[in-house]
Amino acid sequence: MATVPQNSVEPAISAEHLVRRFGQVTAVNDVSFRVEKGEIFGFLGPNGSGKTTVIKMLTGLLPLTSGSARVEGLDVRVDSEVVRERIGYMSQNYSLYQDLTVAENLQFYGRIYSLEPARLKRRIEEVVESNGLGPYMNRLSAKLSGGWKQRLALGCAMLHEPKLLFLDEPTAGIDPVARRQLWDLLFELSGHGITFFVTTHYMDEAERCSHVAYIYYGKIIADGTPNSLRELPDVQPPGTIRVEITTPEVTRALRFARQIAGIRSATIFGQSIHALINDDLNLHDLQEQLLKNGIAVAEIRPLAPSLEDVFVELTYKHQAILEASRA
Amino acid sequence: MPNLFRGFGAVFYKEVLHVRRDAGTLFFSLTMPLLQLFLLGFGIDTNIRQINTVVYNADGRRESRELLDRLKNSDTFHIIRYVENDYDLNDMIIAGKARVGVKIPVDYSDRLIHNMSGQVLILIDGSDSSVAGQAINVTNAIGLDESLRRVLQDRAAFAVDMRPKLLFNPDSRSANFFLPGLTAIMLLNVTTFLTAFSIVREKERGTLEQLFVTPVRPFGLLLGKLLPYLGIGFFELSLILFFMRFVFLVPIHGSVFLLAFLSVPYLFAALSLGILISSKAKSQAEAMQLAFLPILPSVFFSGYIFPRETMPALFYPISYLIPATYYINITRGIILRGAGIKHLWTDGLALFIIGTLLLIIAARRFRNKVIMA
């Protein structure tokens, strides 16, 4: 086993210039980021953008084409076996054995990590307690609802007391209450110093993370706290403000809004339009122009960018760079 | 030193739980082969007897009737109809009602009485080669016998008297021939299916992906999954042997322990095939289709039904690559001929080599196509 530098500032994960190619395709292209201990790190990106590939590289399943990564202070290229002992992993389909009971699933994963019988017994009791699984111990896991399956899966991934947990879309397809409860549980565990690496498609979950990164076609195009990302010049260029236009006719309004000089971009959000406009554009004049075209406007008000706005702006910009480099 | 088999105990325990929970699948996979056993044991007799025969006897006198009696007594022919002309004789064969037509010409008895050669026309339907072959052999033999009897007039013994004696299966029972071979096919069938299914099911559910991010080592995982099915394979083998011995009364001349011992490498080869299939198949339905692939060559090229000696030169070398070829030799050897380890160790060694190679190929493919995918 390699010597582990027990430095308190050693991050939970540090990835430097990760590259992974599959034949001609570069799935992960020069990706670097750090996850500090105790963070809830949200890893976002569209399907097929390389999220799962990065997780597989960090857990030692896929060799790195180039670059380096340290997880819990260990080089994944050298010590992937030890890395896998120290991390927990839970995938979106709650990898449980449907025909085994809750207790049997816990037993199995505990044995996989070679926990001694006494410690296994104690850990099962603790996990059952913290995840509230007590009443279901003898139920087949197939008979649990989505939220309970996910709590059981999380319990299985935590039995060996990992300091770092990878959760790959843990809330896909479960009801909002269970989603909220899971996040409460994550915050509580993170308070005990456990680091979480979470992938998700839900923007409200991204907002809850202490640190987010956005990966787009193999490249990281955003990395920071949600608030620092909102203030990026690419998201909020100098001389612009972001406004919300509330109107009953969003589709027609969007068509006209995009023709008005001074509006840089506009996107529909439910019953309103989020627009990035030059700050010399008077909000009152804007309302007048829309009214002239027969569009009733209920309200126009300034708005702080959401994380979704951030990712939309950064994606546009990245696409523009890609097209420019092709031309 | 890292433990290469890490996780074996946990996976083994879990797999046993799966098997116990899913008693339906287990019951189904154990009884299907027994059904096959009963079908082949009771239903199929390859000894050709009582071939439907149509006769046109234009002569009708004593000599011709004696000849027909001899045909009837051979047990090979069953005369279903007498016709009165050539057209009906042909027509019965074309219609498929009779496979053999016998025409005794009008001068048959006359020619015999005047010490001339009496000719008899035998029409044989060639569309089933084994029936045709048997009909030709028996009619030739009866003709030859009849001729000798007339020439020698019971005055002297035959100059050469061939006395064939069938060893090991004196009654030529089809069950004795088929069931030991069937054992090989059924073991292959059951173990390949079950192993492939148990892995593909985990692939479908995503639990395999989960196992790969735990400290389980591939060998621990595979062995933990294989051994329970090896146990089921052995259970199946004892069931088959039991029914073979006590229901179909096939005598077992050799050592059952030797048979069990030599079954281990065969079962490992079958289990490895299951892993290979699971590394390719994405769904249980696909696994089901792929699992038929090893069955076909095992039925046709192993000597189970068709003797390897009659195979075209192209296929003969292929039969050496098929585990069932060696295992059928082992089962027939031990069960029918009472063969011992000194007769069968080469087959056992071949199985061991093939099984080990298959396991290595399967484990490597599994690593590259499943873990690294």
Image: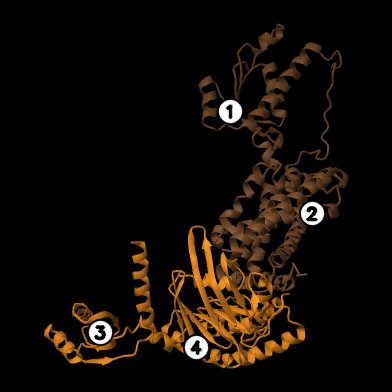
Q: Residues within 10 Å of mark 2 (few under 14, many from 20)?
A: few
Chain with colour brown in the figure? B
Chain letter for mark 3: A
Which residue is tagged 3? A277
In space, the residues marked 1 and 4 are separated at their CA atoms by 87 Å
Discs 1 and 3 lie in a common subunit: no
In space, the residues marked 4 and 2 are separated at their CA atoms by 73 Å
Query: Which of the labelled discs sits on residue B246, or is there none?
Result: 2
Q: Residues within 10 Å of mark 1 (few under 14, many from 20)?
A: some
Amino acid beneath label 4: Ser
* Labels 4 and 2 touching (C-beta < 8 A): no
* Residue furthest left as drawn: A292
Which residue is tagged 4? A210
Eye-nearest disc, 1 or 4: 4
Query: Which of the labelled discs sits on residue B125, or is there none?
Result: 1
Discs 1 and 4 lie in a common subunit: no
Q: Residue at the spot x=76%, y=50% of the render?
A: B353
The foreground one among B92 and B38 is B38
